[in-house]
Image (tube, grey):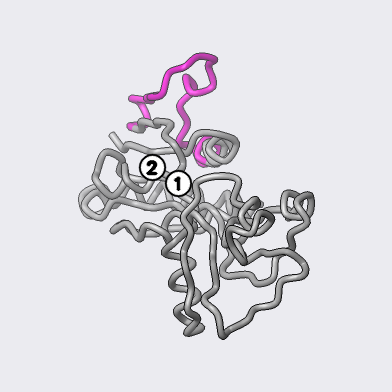
Amino acid sequence: MVNVALPKGRLGEKVYGMFERAGFDCPSIREPGRKLIFENLEKGIRFFWVKPSDVAIYVERGAADIGVAGKDILLEYQPEVYELLDLKTGICRMAVAAKSTFRDDRSKTLRVATKFANIARQYYSGQCRDIDIIHLNGSIELAPILGLSDVIVDIVETGATLKENDLIPFETITPISARLIANQVSYKFKGDIISAIAAGLKGQVKDL
């Protein structure tokens, strides 16, 4: 049995469709209800829904053999997993945004509001820029508006939320998309089936 951790929400549903079309389906997952675990004994596959930010933890610790996680999570937490495939979905970018009037004064410490502290730290370290990380969990756009920070580092999809709050993206740090990841031990002992799943999904990526 191969255990698959899928992120709850729209992305997870889209990715499950890719598994389904690749021949690794589980009909009960389409049934209404609040179940979190779904099995197809004939195909030898078990799916379960988890919070998107938790997928990598389930995979790293072996509760799941494979899973689908955003590149942002992999960069931020750097779990010890194998990254097998870019699924080319859930596409967005990690960016630096600020008020349109912002001008970077390099003589001062740059105040950066974000929930992606490691990504921000590594990015600005590469620029030899002195920063003060302000860790926030939500409504990060408020920080520069209220003077809490100079800039924010966050995921940008369409940019609509930034625009509505009079902010603009200044720099792109890295593109983000959903990735198929595998537990390192599972990949060793269940490599054939995991590789077959990855190949089936790769065929779906080509069709996108």
Q: Position of residue 110 (x, y in %)?
A: 55, 73
The residue that appears at 36% across and 33% down in the rendered structure is 45
Q: Quadrant of the N terminus?
A: top left
Mark 1 surroundings within 10 Å by alpha-carbon count, few (fewer than 14), some (14 through 19), many (20 or more)? many
Q: Is residue 179 above or below residue 33?
A: below
Q: Position of residue 29 (x, y in %)?
A: 48, 23
Say what amino acid the circle numbered 2 marks: Asp
Label 1: which secondary element = strand
Q: Which residue is mark 1?
A: 68
Q: Start and end of the magenta stretch?
A: 19-44
Quadrant of residue 5 in the image?
top left
Residue 40 highlighted magenta (yes or no) = yes
Q: Position of residue 189 (x, y in %)?
A: 20, 49
Q: Is residue 119 above or below residue 200?
A: below
Q: Position of residue 82 (x, y in %)?
A: 34, 59
The residue that appears at 33% across and 32% down in the rendered structure is 44
Label 2: which secondary element = helix
- CA distance separating discs 1 and 2: 10 Å
Front disc: 1 or 2:
2
Residue in front for this viewpoint, 24 or 15: 15
Between discs 1 and 2, the one toward the N terminus: 2
Query: Residue 54, which numbered label?
Result: 2
Mark 2 surroundings within 10 Å by alpha-carbon count, few (fewer than 14), some (14 through 19), many (20 or more)? some
Q: In the shown orientation, is residue 123 left or right of residue 207?
A: left
